[in-house]
Amino acid sequence: MNIQVWQINVKVILLQTIYLEELMTKIAYFIDHAFLDNPKWKEYHKSNNPKLYCFNSLYPIEKTGVYNIDGVYTIQIRTVSEELKNYLLTALKNNETKEIKTVSLTVDNLDYQHLKKLVSVTPLILKTTGGYWKDYLIEREFLKELNRNIIKKY
């Protein structure tokens, strides 16, 4: 299997202090903001389809859970779409929200490898038609829903 995977390293500076509880929302908004200037990519962003990218939280991780104003961090965005990679490299170059501003971008071409295990330092949120899983699912049902969701997205 010959799959190209690109990793865009977005170095950012914080324009406001961000607390851990709202961090992923602010990062998602920062990336979403890059899609809104182009009608094609705005439609892609709004469509109810699997997206060909994923991203992580700010790095380095702040042990206190407080990401301070003027702090410089990195967000990594991975994609298997060359077209999306090229668009993001352009759109993120001068991207700025009220909390986060791009400082610089680099891109790496990653070698495809079969997954042996999946480790995430970003908390997993599973929301189903019944709401958030902790409110009504036991662990076994949660794992079943998670497995179903992963297969669906794959």
Image (spheres, helix red, strand yellow):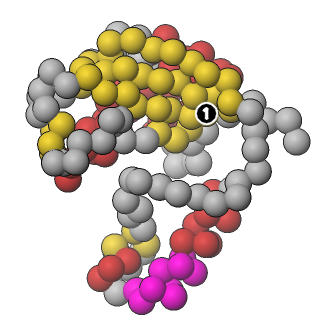
Spot occupied by residue 90 in the image (x, y as percentages of width and height):
49, 11
Q: Nearer the viewer, residue 8 or 133?
A: 8
Determine which residue is flagged by label 1: 79
What's the residue type where badge 1 is placed? Thr
Viewport quadrant of the N terminus:
top right
Is 117 left, or right, of 120 in this rendering? right
Spot occupied by residue 107 in the image (x, y as percentages of width and height):
57, 18
Quarter of the image for residue 16 reads: top left
Q: Nearer the viewer, residue 3 or 70?
A: 70
Q: Residue at x 52, y 24 (%)?
A: 8
Is 3 left, or right, of 1 in this rendering? left
Residue 138 part of the magenta-drawn span: yes
Quarter of the image for residue 151 reads: bottom right
Q: Which residues are magenta?
A: 137-145
Q: Residue at x 33, y 79 (%)?
A: 134
Spot occupied by residue 17 in the image (x, y as percentages of width and height):
11, 34
Q: Residue at x 63, y 27 (%)?
A: 6
Quarter of the image for residue 137 reads: bottom left
Q: Residue at x 34, y 87 (%)?
A: 136
Spot occupied by residue 115 in the image (x, y as percentages of width and height):
70, 54
Residue 136 part of the magenta-drawn span: no
Is 128 left, or right, of 27 in this rendering? right
Viewport quadrant of the C terminus:
bottom right
Q: Nearer the viewer, residue 31 or 12?
A: 12
Q: Main secondary structure of the magenta part?
A: helix
- Density class for disc 1 (Cα within 10 Å; few <14, some 14-19, many ≥20) is some
What secondary structure is found at the residue carrying circle 1?
A: strand
Is residue 25 something that shows in the picture? yes
